[in-house]
């Protein structure tokens, strides 16, 4: 398995399954919450947009396929689509907005227009996940069935990385240091496009866990300020943060690291993937037939569940999931979820050569350790293997849920 180009938030030990969960609380309160408050997910979002201006979605894992299929369904729903002005993307930046705009405005479907935007990600290996590409294609199709004033604007809000100006490892580490302000950068970009939430504009923000928390507090009582915290705290009542149910990141201890730091910080942690509340969430969904469902988190057993996530070591004791998100969407059992395939769209001859430069920049002139880790004899064989498209695969983070 090629691990090198798994992007921030997914620079993970993908093959490591968590041990069986224990200590699960009673399932009945979770089932009761689903029966009383559960709503079909698209209808839930449609209703939420009546009172909130921005819906933030935490996909759980960047390569997760099902959340992005769900996002397509949101654009396809007339009651949602006709209200939306913007879709904000965490993984693209303003530096390449012109390429995104050119693609969406093109009279013919031409994904090649997206290549420059997808080649410049934080890792250097490019953004190849099919879930984003398929979503953008569907957005193009939907927009071209609408009159120009009704078309949805798709906007990249991440910090830009200018690989042409990164000439050595020190340059890259300086860029990584600049990411301290990434969340405020994204917040400011979204708030600006939404005109300060003063005009009733509606939007979706498609992101990941690190940027989707609403009000998680540190042990000293201060907030863990991330993009959605800025949005929720500075524009109260305007934002709804939704967690898409997936495996949860259980961070257990800091880990001494030798070599370069990771952008997402996960290489500096000892962690595993777990089911929420020892599997109680999953058993509750199963009790109701594993039907897709959405529900608010405040005031029920789901919201009172102990917080599990990347900031758990520094979080205030007793933190709960209702401090992290406002709502939950369940799209299917974890055992049936999939990771999307990877496209070869960006693997042009010129980019293959640029990728060699980036690898040498990131790993130094002696690539022995890198090649050994990747299980290849040289850089050219690595590039050949890297460039091949892949198919969707089952999500194997967790063992099957045991019978009740």
Image (tube, grey):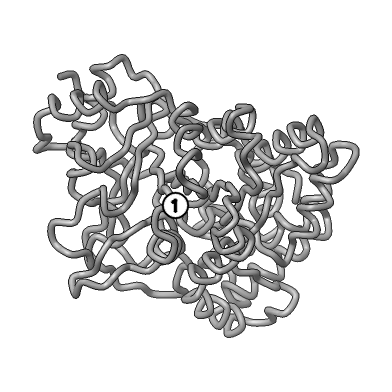
Instruction: Point out residue 212 in the picture as x, y percentages from the top left corner.
Output: 42, 55
**Above or below 129: residue 160:** below
Nearest the viewer among 364 and 219 is: 219
Outermost residue toward the front? 199
Nearest the viewer among 372 and 147 is: 147
Residue at horizontal 75 percent and vertical 40 percent from the top = 150
The answer to whether 404 appears left or right of 101 in the picture is left
Secondary structure at badge 1 equals: strand
The answer to whether 365 appears left or right of 222 in the picture is right
**Rendering quarter of residue 229:** bottom left
**Rendering quarter of residue 15:** top left
Residue at horizontal 37 percent and vertical 19 percent from the top = 291
Instruction: Point out residue 186 in the picture as x, y percentages from the top left corner.
Output: 55, 65
Nearest the viewer among 51 and 60 is: 51
Nearest the viewer among 173 and 135 is: 135
**Above or below 386: residue 120:** below
Outermost residue toward the right? 107
Residue at horizontal 22 percent and vertical 28 percent from the top = 33
Please tell me how crowded label 1 is: few (under 14), some (14-19), or many (20+) other residues with Cα within 10 Å: many
Residue highlighted by disc 1: 239
Instruction: Point out residue 128 in the picture as x, y percentages from the top left corner.
Output: 65, 47
């Amino acid at each position: 398995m090629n691990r090198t180009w798994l992007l921030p938030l997914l620079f993970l030990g993908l093959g490591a399954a968590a041990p069986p969960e224990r200590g699960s609380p009673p399932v009945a309160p979770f089932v009761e919450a689903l029966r009383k408050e559960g709503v079909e997910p698209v209808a839930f979002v449609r209703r939420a947009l009546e009172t909130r201006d921005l819906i933030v979605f935490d996909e759980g894992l960047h390569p997760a396929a099902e959340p992005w299929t769900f996002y397509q369904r949101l654009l396809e729903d007339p009651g949602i689509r006709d209200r939306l002005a913007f879709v904000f993307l965490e993984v693209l930046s303003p530096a390449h907005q012109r390429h995104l705009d050119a693609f969406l405005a093109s009279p013919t479907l031409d994904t090649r227009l997206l290549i420059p935007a997808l080649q410049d990600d934080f890792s250097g290996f490019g953004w190849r996940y099919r879930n984003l590409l398929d979503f953008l294609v569907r957005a193009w199709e939907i927009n071209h069935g609408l009159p120009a004033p009704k078309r949805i604007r798709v906007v990249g809000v991440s910090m830009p990385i200018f690989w042409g100006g990164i000439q050595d490892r020190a340059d890259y580490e300086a860029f990584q240091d600049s990411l301290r302000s990434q969340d405020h950068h994204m917040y400011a970009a979204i708030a600006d496009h939404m005109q300060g939430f003063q005009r009733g504009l509606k939007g979706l923000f498609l992101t990941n866990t690190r940027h989707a928390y609403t009000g998680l507090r540190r042990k000293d009582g201060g907030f863990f300020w991330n993009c959605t915290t800025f949005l929720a705290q500075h524009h109260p009542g305007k934002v709804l943060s939704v967690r898409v149910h997936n495996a949860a990141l259980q961070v257990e201890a800091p880990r001494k690291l030798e070599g370069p730091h990771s952008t997402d910080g996960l290489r500096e942690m000892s962690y595993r993937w777990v089911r929420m509340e020892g599997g109680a969430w999953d058993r509750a969904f199963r009790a109701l037939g594993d039907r897709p469902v959405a529900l608010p988190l405040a005031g029920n057993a789901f919201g009172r569940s102990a917080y599990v996530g990347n900031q758990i070591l520094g979080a205030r004791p007793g933190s709960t999931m209702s401090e992290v998100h406002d709502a939950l969407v369940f799209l299917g059992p974890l055992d049936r979820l999939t990771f999307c395939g990877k496209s070869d769209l960006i693997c042009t001859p010129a980019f293959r050569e640029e990728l060699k430069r980036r690898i040498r920049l990131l790993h130094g002139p002696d690539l022995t350790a890198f090649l050994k880790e990747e299980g290849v004899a040289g850089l050219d064989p690595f590039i050949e293997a890297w460039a091949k498209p892949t198919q969707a695969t089952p999500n194997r983070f967790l063992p099957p849920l045991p019978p009740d």
